[in-house]
Image (cartoon, coloured by chain):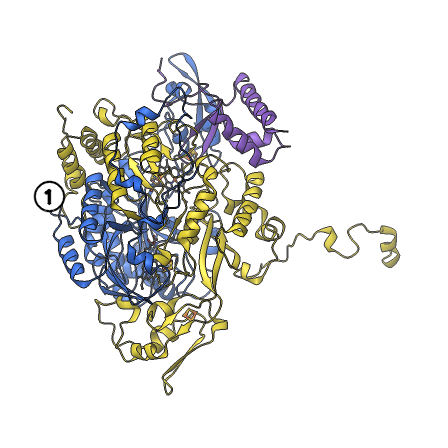
Amino acid sequence: MNKEELKQKIIQIMEEKVKKGGKTKIYLKDLQREIPDANPREIKNAANELVREGKLEYFSTGSTVMFGLPGVGMGLEAGVEKPEE
Amino acid sequence: MGIEKFKELDPIYTQPYDPTLAEKLYNPEKPMENRITDIGPPYFWQFMPPVIQKNYGKWVSHEIIQPGVLKYKSETGDVVYVVRCGTPRLETTDYIREICEIADKYCGGYVRWTTRNNVEFHVTDEETLKALIEDLKNRKHPNGSYKFPIGGTGAGISNIVHTQGWIHCHTPAIDASGVVKAIMDELFEYFGSHKLPAKTKLALACCLNMCGAVHCSDLALVGIHRKPPLVEDERLEHVCEIPLVIASCPLGAIKPATAEVDGKKKKTVRINVDRCMFCGNCYTMCPALPISDGEGDGITIVVGGKVSNRITPPEFSRVVIPYIPNEPPRWPTTVKWLKKIIEVYSQYANKYERIGTWINRIGWERFFELTGIPFTEKCIDDYRLAYTTYRTSMHFKFTKHVDEVFNAPENYKVELFK
Amino acid sequence: MGEVKKHDTPKVDQLKTGPWPSFVDDIYSYAEKHKNQACFDIMGQMELSYTNKETHWKHGGIVGVFGYGGGVIGRYSDQQEKFPAIWAFHTVRVHHTAGKWYHTSALKKLCDMWDSRGSGVVNFHGSTGDIILLGTVTDQLEPIFFDLTHQLHWDLGGSGSNLRSPACCMGKSRCEWALIDVQELDYELTMAFQDELHRPAFPYKFKFKFSGCPLDCVAAVARADMSFIGTWRDDIRIDQEAVRAYVRGELKPNAGAFSDRDWGPFDIKKEVIDLCPTKCMYWDENEQKLYINNSECNRCMHCIAVMPEALRPGQDTGIAILIGAKAPILEGAQLSTLIVPFMKVEPPYDELKDFIYKAWDYWMENGKNRERIGELIQRVGLNKFITEVMGLTPIPQHVRVPRDNPYIFWKEEEVEGGWTRDVAEFRKRHPA
Ligand code: HEM
Ligand code: HEM
Ligand code: SF4
Ligand code: SF4
Ligand code: SF4
Ligand code: SF4
């Protein structure tokens, strides 16, 4: 798998997860599990490149970091700006 | 990318700060434009004074000429004097500027910090040293505390390594800076003197995550929660992603659930409270699971750890007081017990014995007897690898505990810490 | 800045007195001088915490600078109405320099930047090592990053499941015991792994720490997933005349570390020879000469620390690598385990980088979410980690004691004849 294919595959996995109503943020490990034939370091590099291109964004808890699609799910400044109905 | 490995001061630092530059360079529409990344910290060499650069790797010996003041000799014949001062670690830019002013006046503009939040000033002659020490002693905050207490060397107590507490973190069970201030005020005499049997290192972490080497300190405090998180059923589904919350618990104690709030079905979670170890990770993921509790939270005291390989290998600290309530602003019970432990250690330990090596010689039963700290079942390990801490030999001492429990059990009462 | 609103803080105010530097006085002085509402509000919120003994910060999702997964930690007050100036109070981690040396021109410029874009409150330093700038709002994060990189040539430190900012002791800059150049090593590896430092790469956090000698001043053995500690393998250098000077009481033992108490005259037998853990030292009273059986010394540094003018570590120096320290969460606290007892290292440290990549690759492939490398080693077994993962040959130095049980997982290929056996043959020898 070349880098572009890997990047497409990552986006595809993220979009499917969202469609199924599952998690909108995932760990690198989860990506590795979904793409067992790629090397973890390549997955890392591809996912980080997607962030640079604005196609993914980081979600950091301070102790760990996850990846998400920009604007999907619990977003920027979670728990603060999402209005309670 | 990469910035030059500056051996001399990068000229950028002599240009004044321009508060308007960033807005000109940064374009939110094109975040990669003008962006510099992955340059790392400045190369350290440019920040070391000439005498340090010249004698780098050439030092032959050192001497602590008085508490907090060191003299280093180089094979080139050069000497450097160092004055070490405690800082509160939590400070303002004005305090840093004052450090800069001192460094500019006496040290050619160079200064360094130690791992334990002490700041160090370097000079090369005794006259400047005298003036520097005099100056440092006279700098005080408006209400009289020293700005730069001199000490932290040799057989005394160095500054406390600590974490954020109520000034910044969202999961602390205790404050950090306030507790440290209360302790160091009380133990101040040991910071600027060499009268203990060995170096004594204190640390504080405000929750179980233990940012810092708390588990290997001579004396340390750890903040603990004792109540599982609250679950706000009506708010949870609006502010949290349930799968993420479930995944956040290191012990798998969180399960999805539904609850009825005002006749409406709400997605939420339930916590298996018997499995919860009160770490607060779930709250990091979900603001509808608050964990802090004024009554439940408090301090655990651990003792006897070290990291140095000197004489004996590095060792973990052990729990001796499982819980003391939070008592802001000065935590008197905590401070009282710390002081007691240090005084007993100071009285009974041999020269060169760290707290842990001293206890290993006299036995933990003797430690509990001498300090008067009540021993409770909470000090018996039941987490992983607990068995390695059980006593499996006839090597024990007859302290008061044996008499009290086995010769007159009716007299034995577990005292509560209050 | 218009009117500032001050809060009553009677409890917090009690921390203004006493000899130890008061952060309360400092923050209030700053607040008054700069009419800084955030500083008044932070003291107000602290007072509230001191009243109900609970924190008033909440965590908040993603804040950070574009393209970096760490370096910024989001924070919001839960008292937005009472303390509006700190409703958002994010921290920025600025990567400290190796050995924590600074020139004031850089520090003052950093202060100017923080006065203009943040609260003015800082930590020198956070317990990982970084300089921590405490308290700013989301809109200022990108400008701060641009100021740091363009005007200060300074980058952020790590947080999250990244490589955290490496840290070292003062090393050769001042310490005569530094057996390796920890500062250069720290800087080189920091630069080599910038990508891992700024962007998520691992199942969880990873820390490097470097100590120049076995006294381990940065607590590498307790705090780092990979601890690098200097050591030596030739003889301790002895200046016999200086030893005699200690014995005669002319030099202060331990460089004067015990000066404020009368421990009696220095007794070399009691204080050095008898405390040597390997009992490899001998003081000949007649000859007035110190002997060390260096091949038995475990380099604990005690004798050297007691008589620094007389004894110095050897000159054939190198690095030991220990792996796997962590705080108690989750599998209990761990110290690092010795993997490489001695290795010569020199810039650009390629063999070290290879070693690190080997360990990382295995961890990235096999580590579970939030599993530190030390926990992974426990799960797969140290023996397997040494041999199969790192490709090293096990030696007795890897363990404190050998195992106490014979429950060994032999592999088929290790057993003569393999595991496939012929029942008929067996029954020929052992009729049922
Ligand atoms: C005799 C003279 C000694 C001197 C001049 C000395 C100097 C220092 C200095 C300057 C630091 C701060 C290091 C840094 O920030 O990079 C330090 C920290 C430390 N020292 Fe020493 N040291 C001495 C003896 C010892 C001894 C005898 C031990 C152990 C028994 C020891 C154990 C440590 C440890 C563990 C730290 C780490 C502090 C931390 O946890 O952050 N030192 N020492
Ligand atoms: C699951 C566990 C953990 C979580 C959720 C966690 C979370 C955090 C958070 C939120 C902060 C930022 C505090 C602030 O500035 O507001 C922090 C800081 C830090 N953490 Fe952790 N942490 C965890 C485990 C650890 C462990 C195991 C270590 C060390 C071995 C550690 C070391 C640190 C250090 C050194 C800091 C800097 C704090 C300071 O300098 O005051 N953390 N952590
Ligand atoms: S020890 Fe816990 S509460 Fe304290 S700063 Fe670290 S994560 Fe926050
Ligand atoms: S506090 Fe920790 S152990 Fe308890 S439920 Fe939350 S994450 Fe799990
Ligand atoms: S670890 Fe060793 S080399 Fe480094 S500062 Fe401490 S005593 Fe010196
Ligand atoms: S370094 Fe330690 S083990 Fe070696 S001779 Fe000195 S005291 Fe003995």
Q: Which residue is mark 1?
A: B142
> What residue is rendered at 50% in x and 47% in y?
C374
Percent from the top left, x then y, of residue B307? Answer: 39, 56
Per the rendering, the colour in which chain B appears is blue
Q: Chain letter for purple?
A: A
Chain under callout 1? B
Percent from the top left, x then y, of residue B362? Answer: 35, 65
- Please name whichever residue, B399 or B182, is drawn nearer the observer in this view of the structure: B182
> What residue is rendered at 34% in x and 57% in y?
C173
Residue type at numbered disc 1: Pro
Percent from the top left, x then y, of residue B3? Answer: 40, 40
Q: Chain letter for yellow?
A: C
In this view, B239 is above or below B81? above
The quadrant of the rendering that contains the N terminus of chain B is: top left
Q: Is residue C177 visible?
A: yes
Left or right? Give the position of A20 relative to B330. right
Percent from the top left, x then y, of residue C311? Answer: 37, 72
